[in-house]
Image (cartoon, rainbow, N blue to C red):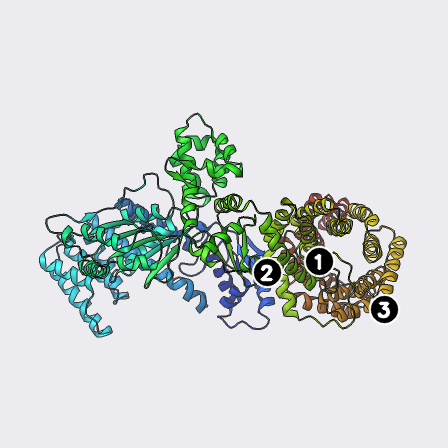
Amino acid sequence: MNVRFGVLGPLRIEGGQVPGPAKHRTLLAALLLSARETVPVERLMSVVWDDRPPASAGSVLRVYVSALRKLVDGIHTVPGGYLIDVERDEVDCHRFERLVGGARQARAAGRVAEAADGFRAALALWRGQALADVESSVLRRTHAVPLEELRLTALEERVELDLRLGRGAEVIGELRALVGAHPLRERAWVRLIEALQQAGRRSEALAAYQDARRTLVDELGLEPGAELADAHRRVLAGEGRPVAPAGGDRGPVDELPPDISDFVGRSPVLDWIVRTAREHASAPVHLVLHGPPGCGKSAVAVHAATGLERPDGRLYASLGARPPGAVLEDLLRSLGCPDGAVPPALDERVRLYRSMTARRRLLVVLDDAADEAQVRPLLPTGPGSLTLVTSRSPLAGLEAARAYEMGVLDGDEAVAMLGAVAGHERVRAEPEAALRIVRLCGHLPLALRIAGSRLARKPGWTLDHLAGRLGDERSRLDELSAGDLAVRGSLALGYRGLADPERRLLRGLGALSAPDFASWVFGTDLEPLAEAGLLQSRGLDEAGQERYGWHDLTRLYAAERLAEEEGGPERVLAVIAGAILERTRQARASLLPAEPGTGRTEVHLPGTERLETGWLRHEARWLSAERRFLVATVGDFYRVGLYEAAWRLAFYLTPLFELGAHHDDWHATTATGLDAARAAGHRHGEALLLRGLADLHRAEGRTESAAAALRAAQPLVEGLELARITLRLGLVQARPAQAEQAFVRALRVFEEAGDRRGRADALRALGALRRDEGRLKESLSAYQDLGDPRGEAEALLDLGRLHLGGGRLAEARGCVERRLRINRRLGDRLPEAGALLVLAEIARAEGAPGAAAGSAREALETFVAYGDRRGAAQALMALARAELDLDDTDGAVETLTRAMGEFDRLSDEQGRAEAGRLAQEARRRRI
């Protein structure tokens, strides 16, 4: 794969044109530096305007993105930001980092020549200073500086390998240039001295040391560090290469367990260990590898330690629940302390251990640590010593330690591990079954090793057979056991180490099927479970809550403990159902103020306070953040027979699904909700869910299905709810007269009952149908009185369409732009896209096809990002009309071809026919 994009030097596009404007270059660089990852809009604004974005930054950024798309393919709008969809290896900085990682792996495996060549290939990608022509101090600080540092480190590491290969004379010139450019890098001076000594130029090596010492004293007021002084000593002693110090009569101790022969992957953490150990070699380095049970922390620590050399030995201790005094006794004996000389008291053992390690460069692996207090006495104190600690907790209180959170393997690594244990030929023979096993094991190394071991012991089994056995959740933990390896046992260690309240909390979480959740669900802090490695923090969600997730096998274990110790999930879900329903009902009310949202008919009296925009936006974000949790909870409630809770929760979620075009979730929860309402014998609830189903069908353009759902709901209700169904029947009527009758009937009922929300909805529907400006303005005023900005926005759009149809373009633009301001203030992206389509029509009517095309493209980006096919098809039609106005017939034909494809997927024959007609017109003009 060729490098297509370059940032290691001036910005470069292979075979293409680099953007001219400085801010366009900055924007492209930011996207390339995070290739295939979403870059949030806020981050891009910070990068492009150097942390000082103007008020108009959001709209200007969209213009910049549009301009970049003309030069570079693959820039997509995604929820919350943008990404560039290019292979990471096509960007030189990402290839550079990958090649450096590969070279380090080769070095760790003892393949010195291969490693040197790998570093050389990585360094050859550089064409100058990183981001040389990108004017962004933010990018330079966050990306260019680390890349430049990695470049220098890689160069030093490559030179070290060249010296091992006896190439000292060949690298002297390169090293002189390096120390000239970076005179304060002691390691560069060390390598120069070693190269000169290896080349037989002893006097020059001694002179180089004096130059280095003079520079450090003059510039920093410091004498050379230990590594540089040691290089000087070796030259004076006539030693060509460093030698390990003598260890007395016995050689350096090496107590590491054997490395795993089938170890695969984990390059990022291995590189981090090597890099951190090197960067801080003048002091003792303490590194913590933490993560959930079974993620391979111990295997990584041993594998990394095997590839790291320390002249005074490598120690290993398995901690578990052992007190530090007992562990210290073993470590002191390993260091040569006679049995009778080990002090009895803990503090005396600590002092002796620190004294014995103070002048030694050791590597110590402390496996399966429980907490900071257990680890502190065991840390060696000698400069250059390295401690690798594994723990389920990050050990945040461990002073001067650096932590790395380990997760599961990625897809390729997981398949490779399964193949390494079970046999690569078997995995290649059944690739789909192998992927199923990987998925059912949740990419967890321990589970994969057990699955592979079972296959290795059962040569007659196919992978498909094992995948079938793992497919049953009830017995999956039983299947994941082989010899003394068992996923259940690994999880049980963490569970038994919890206090009773945390055990009870973990069991309670076992009632949930959601992939992640926040603390509000149980009203208690989830951090203790994260500290124990049984939950993992997913960071802050869009509502500002910290979310926690867990491995699927941990979920199964929690559910198993819940069933065995408390009889199952029914009681837990019954306890939390009320809080979940009330919190969701409140959020729904923010989307539909004064709407009967509890399933009970409510009349909202005058005097409702106007809702604050910030609160409205927050509630919408909260619903969006909790969507996956709440969708899963509908199913949880239904499965344990909490039918009332299930149908109510499904009903409360419908405005969220409509706002975000989450049609799959809408279908699934409505089906479950209807089953629940019918199982509960709740006719009113069934009618509410049927009304929601009709809204879904109408959003998908299936008016006949919508009408059928509404007719099925009519016999179930009366009064105000019947009026709401009547109103919606009018919205799907093909005949205007019948629609008008429905609206008038519904309006009469709402007005007689004092239902202000229903009245506002009916006035808007009637006004839009009759093209009655007065009715629409009445509805606008009604929504404003209700404090419902989203209803206000819909009324404004209807007024804008009315003015557009009457040729009153200024009034139309004013209404639509007011609508857009509301949408953007609330963060409602899809309604904003709908308004942009009307704005495109207005721009065409004003004779501004370029502006129309811009609005249509912006709308299209949003519809595509949210997966709204119908909206995307409409945006493509709007764009094609603008392109025809611009005489861009080629562009119009291409756009209409895309539109016809969307209409085909929607089974929309009318839309397909209209797109086909326009395409014929475009081809006719092209002739």
Q: Which residue is mark 1?
A: 882
Closer to us: mark 2 or mark 1? 2
Classify mark 1: helix, strand or loop: helix
Q: Is residue 450 left or right of residue 567?
A: left
Rendering coords of residue 647 (x, y %): 69, 50
Residue 355: % across, % down: 18, 61
Identify the mark nearer the N-term, 3 or 1. Answer: 3
**Between discs 2 and 3, the one toward the N terminus:** 2
Q: Alpha-carbon distance for marks 2 and 1?
A: 16 Å
Which residue is most to the top?
Answer: 460
Residue 519: x and y in percent read 53, 59
The residue beneath circle 2 is 66
The crowding category of the residue bearing disc 1, from other C-alpha atoms within 10 Å (few below 14, some 14 to 19, many at least 20), is many
Q: Residues within 10 Å of mark 3 (few under 14, many from 20)?
A: few
Residue kind at label 3, given as amino acid type = Gly
Along the viewing direction, whichever of 669 and 873 lies nearer the viewer: 669
Query: In the image shown, does 172 or 362 lie closer to the viewer?
Result: 362
Residue 600 visible: yes
Q: Nearer the viewer, mark 2 or mark 3?
A: 3
Q: Position of residue 616 (x, y in %)?
A: 65, 66
Left or right of 733 on screen, residue 195: left
Neighbour tally class for label 2: few under 14, some 14-19, many 20 plus, Cα within 10 Å: some
Amino acid carrying label 1: it is: Ala
